[in-house]
């Protein structure tokens, strides 16, 4: 989906999103429980900074806030103001003081100005308009030895089991809410997309690990960014996307700055 389509659709869906997820991803498909696994794959988080890419209404925050502890930080990033508005209400309600919300595009991550210790993304990269670039940027902003963990769909639906029969209802619900990810219901397109995605991850991460859920339809991938070789510096000059996002300071790491 194009960025402006994503923003429009998620802005419109934001008010109903949590109810939809509780009902369809929670009660019907029983997928919510996998959040704990994808967070666990990030490894030790106490006192660390975690970036939640495409955080939506903040459904990963309870797990992340608990894992980073009072000295850690959670950065929730999303391109939809509507979704971030819901996330903000959650943060206020729970009184979390170490959760920061950032309106930004996952493909540029221009507002992430310091390296983070871990990147999490749950059911976001499936709708991102340029997956390869988004994965590249997520790895750019990751501190060496930092971890990344992604939950997505690798196939359009389960091929066996009872959920196979429930899945059409999920599609119907997604379409009714206006969140139709289009090509993501096409197996060939999805597989090709994640083959490319894996190539990006493989070329820049170590210890790549894959798991499946939802009878093979769901895909969890995690890995760790290698330690920098001595003397190697990195630069990150994110190209701001042709964004519909508010203008803001162009966030880029200092040119040539050595990673501490
Ligand atoms: C299905 S929701 C998942 C939200 C949340 N991660 C969860 O687990 O409930 C997908 C989210 O990704 C966001 N998103 C999609 N493309 C994005 C992009 N290019 N940049 C930032 N956020 C994006 C949408 O706005 C939406 O909030």
Image (cartoon, grey):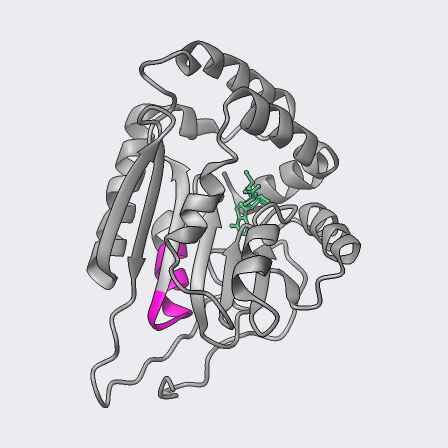
Residue 242 visible to an observer of this rendering: no
Name the one closer to the observer, 197 or 20.
20
Task: Find ligand 1 in the image and state its quadrant.
Answer: top right
Name the image quarter holding the C terminus: bottom left
| Residue 59, image x, y percentages | 60, 45
Span of residues in magenta: 134-146
Which quadrant of the view contains residue 160? top left
Q: How many marks?
A: 0
Look at the picture and state if 75 lies above or below 2.
below
Q: Report if residue 43 lies within the magenta region.
A: no
| Residue 192, image x, y percentages | 26, 36
| Residue 164, image x, y percentages | 40, 13
- Which residue is painted at 47% across and 45% down in the image? 36
Name the one closer to the observer, 79 or 120.
120
- Which residue is painted at 25% across and 61% down in the image? 205
Which quadrant of the view contains residue 20? top right
Tell whether 259 sits left or right of 170. left
| Residue 112, image x, y percentages | 53, 70
Tell whether 171 sits left or right of 103. left
Look at the picture and state if 222 lies above or below 192.
below
- Which residue is painted at 65% across and 70% down in the image? 248
Residue 96 visible to an observer of this rendering: yes
- Which residue is painted at 65% across and 68% down in the image? 98
């Amino acid at each position: 989906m194009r960025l402006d389509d994503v923003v429009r659709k998620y802005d419109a869906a934001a008010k109903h999103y949590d109810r939809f997820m509780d009902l369809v991803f929670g009660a019907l498909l029983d997928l919510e429980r996998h959040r704990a696994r994808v967070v666990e794959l990030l490894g030790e988080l106490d006192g660390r900074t975690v970036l939640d890419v495409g955080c939506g209404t903040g459904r990963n925050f309870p797990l992340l806030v608990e894992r980073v502890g009072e000295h850690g930080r959670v950065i929730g990033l999303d391109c939809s103001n509507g979704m971030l508005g819901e996330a903000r209400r959650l943060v206020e309600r729970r009184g979390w003081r170490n959760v920061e919300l950032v309106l930004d595009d996952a493909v540029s991550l221009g507002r992430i100005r310091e390296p983070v210790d871990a990147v999490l993304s749950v059911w976001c990269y499936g709708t991102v308009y340029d997956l390869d670039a988004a994965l590249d940027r997520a790895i750019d902003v990751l501190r060496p030895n930092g971890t990344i963990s992604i939950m997505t769909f690798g196939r359009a639906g389960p091929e066996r089991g009872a959920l196979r029969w429930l899945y059409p209802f999920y599609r119907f619900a997604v379409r009714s809410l206006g969140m139709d990810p289009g090509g993501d219901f096409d197996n060939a397109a999805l597989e090709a997309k994640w083959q490319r995605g894996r190539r990006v991850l493989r070329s820049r991460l170590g210890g790549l690990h894959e798991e499946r859920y939802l009878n093979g339809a769901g895909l969890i991938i995690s890995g760790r960014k290698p330690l920098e070789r001595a003397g190697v510096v990195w630069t990150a000059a994110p190209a701001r996307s042709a964004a519909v996002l508010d203008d803001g300071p162009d966030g880029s790491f200092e040119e040539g700055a050595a990673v501490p």
